[in-house]
Image (cartoon, grey):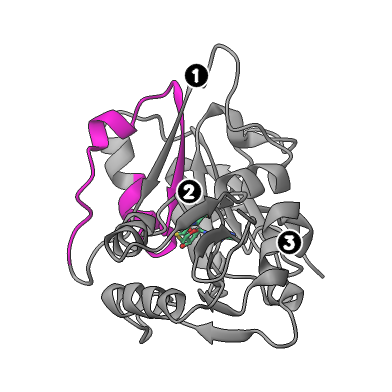
Amino acid sequence: MSEFPTGSVWLVGAGPGDPDLLTRKAERLIGKATVIFYDALVGPDVLGFASSGARLVHVGKRAGRHSKDQKTIDSLIVEAALSGERVIRLKGGDPAIFGRVTEELEACRHAGVHVQICPGITAASAAAASLGASLTLRGMARKLTFVTAHARVGEALDLDWDRLSDPDATLAIYMGKSAAGEIASRLIEAGMPGDMPAALVENASLPDERTFVTRLDLLPISAMTALGDGPAIILVGHAVSGNAAPATARAVAGRCCASEVTSAP
Ligand code: SAH
């Protein structure tokens, strides 16, 4: 069977945005698709690999903005496949990390549609690369926890803060920018030191990327400084101070400022 028969679906990871961070397989599949349902977080240049005849359908969602609901997306994918298209569902990062991939796999399988996953580089990996840091650190960060801080509007975050405050782990917090204040205070309450290195990376791998390295108790200031509405990921733990001096946030004459390590011109 060919890699991408008509009437089949690929759930493809588009990586963090930079088209050079797409896998060769993803690029090849994108070029063969007849229809691509893509998310808001898919880098614009990635869609440039689609063939000129392909139909590009935006089904994306960003916090607070209208988008197609998951069931509608599931039906669109299945219907397109059943009508004989080569379907790609293109998602930012890795489709299997906070990507609602299970629903789409189940919808396809239920309809008897052949479906496969092509992985992508997740935001945490791209952010660590931008920081010049590792996500793990021998002897000090032996675990890596991926967590989403997404909560329904008006609801508190329902996370196991005692477990997350483990100082021997690196925390990669997706969808956490607007909850940075709550995240920092709950982790500190649960026992994580306030001077634990913390980083925030907005638009990782894209030309307007911004990276901030600070400490946990000053993380909320960085989150406020990162005013863009681009996606941002928070990394917390000994491993993430990267090339910057650890705990680079400074208190200057009573005024705290997070140190911005790099910023696109
Ligand atoms: N499947 C994606 C994650 C989807 S959840 C992945 O593997 O990366 C969406 C969240 O991912 C965003 O709110 C943000 O926290 C993070 N994210 C995605 N792209 C990003 C980028 N280029 N820079 C920083 N964070 C990003």
Residue extent of the magenta highlight? 155-184
Image depth: mark 2 or mark 3 in front: 3
Q: Which mark is residue 43?
A: none
The residue where tag 3 is placed is 28
Q: Where residue 218 is drawn, which disc sits there?
A: 2
Counting the numbered discs, the total is 3
> Which is more foreground, mark 3 or mark 1?
3
**Label 1 environment density (alpha carbons within 10 Å; few <14, some 14–19, many ≥20):** some
Residue 164, compared with residue 256, is above or below; it is above
Of 63 and 196, nearer the camera is 63
- At x 24%, y 30%, the residue is 162
Residue visible at 59% across and 70% down?
42
Query: Identity of the amino acid at label 2?
Result: Leu
Residue 142 is labelled as 1
At numbered mark 1, what does the secondary structure look like: helix, strand or loop?
Answer: loop
* Label 1 beta carbon within 8 A of ligand 1: no
Residue 11: % across, % down: 50, 60
Give the CA distance from mark 2 to mark 3: 43 Å
Q: Residues within 10 Å of mark 3 (few under 14, many from 20)?
A: some
N-terminal-most mark, 3 or 1: 3
Q: Amino acid at mark 1?
A: Arg
Disc 3 and disc 1 in contact, CB within 8 angstroms: no
Q: Is residue 254 visible?
A: no
Q: Residue at x 19, y 58 (%)?
A: 156
Q: Is residue 20 magenta?
A: no
Residue at disc 2, secondary structure = helix
Whether residue 2 is visible to the viewer of this picture, yes or no, is yes
Q: Is mark 3 within 8 Å of ligand 1?
A: no
* Residue 29 or residue 5, whichever sits in front: 5
Mark 3 vs mark 1, CA separation in Å: 36 Å
The mark nearer the N terminus, 2 or 1, is 1
214 vs 70, left or right, is: right
